[in-house]
Amino acid sequence: MAEGQFTIVEEGSVTFPSGFSAGGLHCGLKKTDRHDLGAIVCEVPAAAAAVYTTNVFQAAPIKVTRESINSSGMLRAVIVNSGNANACTGKQGEADAYEMRNVFADIIGVAHEDVAVASTGVIGELLKMDRVRSGISQLPAKLEASEQGAEDFSQAILTTDLVKKTIAVELVIDGKTVRIGGAAKGSGMIHPNMATMLGFVTTDASIEPEALQLLLRQVTDLSFNMITVDGDTSTNDMLVAMASGLAGNNTLNEAHPDWEAFRVAMTHVCVHLAKAIARDGEGATKLVEVRVEGATSDEAAQAIAKTIIGSSLVKSAVFGADANWGRIIAAVGRAGQPVNPDTVDIALGDIVTLRQSSPVAFDEEAALEYLQGDTVVISVQLNMDNGKAKAWGCDLTYDYVRINAAYRT
């Protein structure tokens, strides 16, 4: 299926681009027998970039990964565990994160600084390093440049997620087929400015590390920074991109004639993963998309969209299939952005509920039927200028409280 200048590849993931293998296994960090340790490995040094949580309390793996990427702008691998966040664990947690990195690097025969580390799970508990060491020793045998390897990795990074989140696309640059793959996890503690989410993007494009870092920040602002599940920002969020360069294209940077095509494809990958996280929000039954147009700037539209999607009252109304547009306009008004109180239009799907800030008679039964679907689109037209943005989230359900009331126990 083609979309724009790229093609979406069914069942593709992080092993789709040339040069990458992945795998996962159960080492005993989770109480169930689900995979809880995984890795992505590149057969050559890969240009690398990352963005991290804005939470002041950043988990130990973030320090380690930041150091690894900053050392050269290159990576050979990333190792990930779930079931334990290794966050707020002091000097011991930091030492454990370095040990994860160094032991895995030694086993696969690369420099310590060529490996990134990510963790997700419960905050404030030390890793069971005997189990981690045992798992790392078995991990290289699980690495495959195949769909199965990608599947095992995707399973290894999940916590309260109900489904894996993956995607792959390909496009032509300089006459060469360039591939981009992605995998992510996230279900709760999700809020704009990164969240309990981990994301991994691989590509075989040749691209300068500085250009990859710039691009990753740009696409993050349009994707992962535009989702929310519950308004909480985690200690562990991380998005890592690796580029093997094996596609053979001329090295990408902003001056390359196909830069925009690559940017669009990368944005699609990250938006797809971000929406998948929002759809899989803890206890969620619906994906909610908020579209804001006519704002004074794109930044203003983003702030308004994120305020609406983060409103507990809006999320509760969507869960109850209640066409309570008053909650939406209240969120618009408290977003702290320029709004003309006389020119706002609101629609639920195709059902207009407000025009020029005045109520519009609408079919309540039709609205009920629409809101009972699994995807709900809220459109807000401010009629002021050309600023626009989209944000994604989910409804707020009884199950969200149930899951988080006993997360540790």
Image: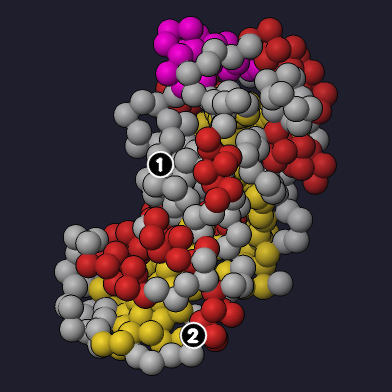
Quadrant location of the N terminus in the rendered image: bottom right
Residue 190 on the magenta segment: no
| Res. 216 in view | no
Q: Is residue 176 above or below residue 368?
A: above
Residue 99 spot, x, y in % from top left: 57, 11
Side of 229 relative to 345 (left or right): right
**Secondary structure mostly taken by the magenta-highlighted segment of the chain:** helix
Residue 47 spot, x, y in % from top left: 53, 38
**Residue drawn at (59%, 72%) of the image:** 372
Tell me the number on the disc at residue 335: none
Q: What residue is pinned by disc 1?
A: 232
Disc 2/disc 1 C-alpha distance (Å)? 33 Å
Q: Is residue 310 above or below residue 37?
A: below
Circle 1: element type = loop
**Residue drawn at (73%, 19%) of the image:** 28
Q: Nearer the viewer, residue 174 or 134?
A: 134
Q: Is residue 395 above or below residue 123?
A: below
Residue 93 on the magenta segment: yes
Quadrant location of the C terminus in the rendered image: top right
Residue 213 spot, x, y in % from top left: 42, 43
Tell me which label, 2 or 1, sits earlier in the chain: 1
Q: Residues within 10 Å of mark 1 (few under 14, many from 20)?
A: some
Q: Looking at numbered disc 1 in the image, what kind of residue is underneath it?
A: Asp
**Residue drawn at (42%, 11%) of the image:** 90
Magenta part of the chain? 86-105
**Residue drawn at (69%, 24%) of the image:** 30
Q: Is residue 229 above or below residue 51?
A: below
Q: What residue is pinned by disc 2?
A: 364
